Image: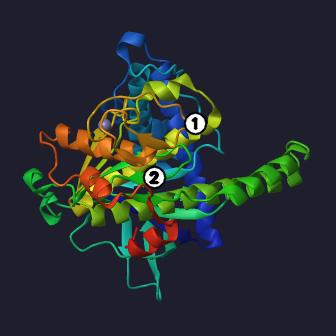
Amino acid sequence: MEYSHRYHAYPTQEVAERLEHHLDVHRQLYNHVRWDYENSPEDDRPSEYDQNNKLPEWKQRWPVFGELHSKAAQATVARFHHNLTVLSELKEKGYSVGRLKRQAPAEYRSVTYNQSGFDLDEKRGHDKYAYVRFSKIGWVKIRYSRSIPDHATIKEVTFKKETTGEWFVSFGLETEDADLPEKPDVDSLDASNSVGIDLGILNYIHTSDGKTVDWLDLEDDYECLRREQRKLSRKDHGSRNYEKQRQKVAKVKYRIRRKVLDYQHKLTTWLVNEYDAVFVEDLDVKRMLQGDGNARNKQDAAWRQFIQILEYKANLYGTHVVQVETKGTTKECARCDVATLKPIWVREHSCPSCGFETDRDANAAMNILQRGFAELGLGWPEDTPVETVTATDTTQFEFVSARHVIETGSLPS
Ligand SMILES: [Zn+2]
């Protein structure tokens, strides 16, 4: 199992300058790797292995490359080839992709040390701090907000300069699968320990056991972003003030990204602690490619990231996560399966066939739960929430605020 820990870093002025310098040389190396690749005959493109073998020769021709740690240089070659793979996968999925571009200084922000060339000193920092050393660069102080588990192996360490000018260090970790909790036996799953979740049209998450979790309210942050972007548009491009304002915009964007990520970490931690199985909507790529509006795309991207984090946590905590086909989950009745056409403004589900009544999104979430059970090869769950809901005649959701979820699920994220 692979995962990572990320820490805020506080290099001294002197070390920061060396970090910057290495970033730039790695960027030049990346661009050279790209140039070498692009200028090879189409039927004889160099592999990662081939290009690693060229490194000593390049170092002789351009001594600046000799300043880099050799494993870090190889990681930069690996990054180019990884990007190539990602590009061809996107192409296969139907995206229109071009070729990999040269990296400008503003775009190239991180360097990875793979396997060696780094040390971690947990004792050197006071309180919540520690130090990490990058070979050929020096020691960097980090805010060591959570320790790396004893049973984890550090596979690689990356330093990164964010667009805000702040530095971060992240550790790529690996643990033996034996150290992870096992996922519960599929046969032990039932409606009391499993949940189906539906993303409501108003950016709410609905659960099949009748909970509503409100989405993060970012209106103020987006308003702030629009304000700073308007200011930026009035500055002279390339001037000092423009650069200052550009950094302000980057800071707000970064704050929004971190807030979303933090919220998703807390929400997923809550879900994997609360349930043995979580069933979610499967978003198909086609919908995203249709590009029906920027907001829709943004929401899809956020949902995709949410599922990724959920799956990662599920492995860590021993929880099943299953993506299910959601076509028709809103129309179908969760109790009798009869489909009824339902315009988007109709908020209730009221089945003309069996009389089952509940909230539109509760019905969808219950369908997702049942499809999840079918996907795992299990029968209709005993004691389904459908029965619970009809028995108590609950047509309203219990409302769970994000803060509540965050507090109850606040394990280290
Ligand atoms: Zn029905």
Quadrant of the drawing holding the N terminus = bottom left
Check mark 1 vs ligand 1: CB closer than 8 Å? yes or no: no
Mark 2 highlights which residue?
205
Quadrant where ligand 1 appears? top left
State left or right for residue 381 relative to residue 400: left
Q: Earlier in the sequence, mark 2 or mark 1?
A: 2
Kind of residue indicated by mark 1: Arg
State left or right for residue 190 relative to residue 166: left
Q: Would you say residue 116 is visible in this rendering?
A: no
Q: Pointer 2 and pointer 1: residues touching (CB < 8 Å)?
A: no
Mark 1 Cα-neighbour bin, 10 Å: few <14, some 14–19, many ≥20: few
- Residue at the extreme bottom of the image, as rendered: 126
Kind of residue indicated by mark 2: Ile
Quadrant of the drawing holding the C terminus = bottom left
Along the line of sight, the residue nearer the viewer: 398 or 258: 398
Q: Based on the displayed image, in which of its 4 quarters is residue 277 positioned?
A: bottom left
Q: Nearer the viewer, mark 2 or mark 1?
A: 2
Mark 2 Cα-neighbour bin, 10 Å: few <14, some 14–19, many ≥20: some
State left or right for residue 178 relative to residue 338: left
Along the line of sight, the residue nearer the viewer: 341 or 237: 341
Q: Residue at x 49, y 20 (%)?
A: 38
* Residue 238 x/y as whole percent: 85, 44
Q: Based on the displayed image, in which of its 4 quarters is residue 215 positioned?
A: bottom right
* Residue 229 x/y as whole percent: 80, 48
* Residue 63 x/y as whole percent: 52, 44
* Residue 279 x/y as whole percent: 29, 47
Along the line of sight, the residue nearer the viewer: 309 or 294: 294
Mark 1 highlights which residue?
296
Q: CA distance from mark 2 to mark 1?
A: 16 Å
Above/below status of 245 relative to 34: below
Above/below status of 226 relative to 217: above
